[in-house]
Image (cartoon, grey):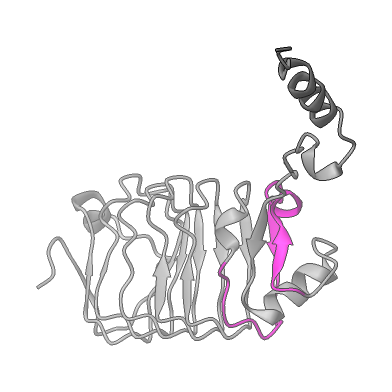
Amino acid sequence: MRKINFAFPLIFLLILSGCSSDDNNGPIEEDNPLIIARTTIPDVMFERALIELNLDDVEDGSVLTSSIENIADLIIEDKGITNLSGIEDFTSLVGLWARDNMLATLNVSKNSNLKFVVAPNNLLTVLNVSNLSMLERIQVENNGLTQLNISANTALQQLSLANNSLLAIDISNILNLIQLNTFSIENNPLDCIQVNAEQFNNIPSQWTKDETDTYALECN
């Protein structure tokens, strides 16, 4: 009896299968899109201000991080801004001018290059300037601050805090007396200003406070 060889038909079918032109059986290319970093800007007025400065072009709640990370000075005064979330990605920021807005809180603790914070005439109750060893100027008069920690801001030259709601202030960390050439604290509900021994013995004439306030090495 003649034997039937099944090997040849099987090999032929395998070859046909491998040569199929069906796209579904072809190689699958992985998508690897370029991810472009964006910074969320939740406050529409803040984003509009960035558009006016040509740092953004579409009002969509975000901005290209690459458009803001090299900005040294940001002037956004009288723009109706209530929230500066996103400011942390301005990593090269040296000066922030944000007077005459409606900010209730301001956290610039991640802007390590910052030297100037100018935000008078807002609604500030919280200002976070921790970690800013290069900060030279804090100007936040006419706000609602109840406390302010400047223990990390040893380079301060100007501290303007008039017309707030501060219950205490400690400026004893500023060891160079000549350095802090401007200090104003009048019209706050505190009655004691904590200073160091050098400051206590040589209070600069340009420092201003209420007549009933006193300087002391320790405040209760």
Q: Is residue 6 magenta?
A: no
The residue at the far right in this view is 21
What secondary structure prevails in the magenta region? loop
Q: Is residue 158 left or right of residue 166?
A: right
Q: Is residue 69 magenta?
A: yes
Instruction: Identify the residue at image location x=32%, y=81%.
Output: 146
Q: Quadrant of residue 213?
A: bottom left
The residue at the far top in this view is 2
Give the camera-side residue of 152 and 198: 152
Q: Is residue 33 above or below residue 56?
A: above
Instruction: Identify the residue at image location x=64%, y=70%.
Output: 41
Q: Is residue 140 above or below residue 25?
A: below
Instruction: Identify the residue at image location x=62%, y=83%.
Output: 101
The residue at the far front in this view is 1
Q: Which quadrant, please, contains the N terminus?
A: top right
Q: How many marks?
A: 0
Residue 22 in the image, given as x and y percentages of width and height: 86, 42
Q: Which quadrant, please, contains the C terminus?
A: bottom left
Give the camera-side residue of 178 and 105: 105
What residue span does the magenta drawing correspond to? 60-85
Give the camera-side residue of 89 and 186: 89
Q: Quadrant of residue 211?
A: bottom left
Residue 149 in the image, given as x and y percentages of width and height: 31, 63
Q: Is residue 205 above or below residue 197?
A: below
Give the camera-side residue of 91 and 38: 38
Residue 3 in the image, given as x and y percentages of width and height: 70, 13
Q: Is residue 42 left or right of residue 212?
A: right
Residue 84 in the image, given as x and y percentages of width and height: 58, 71
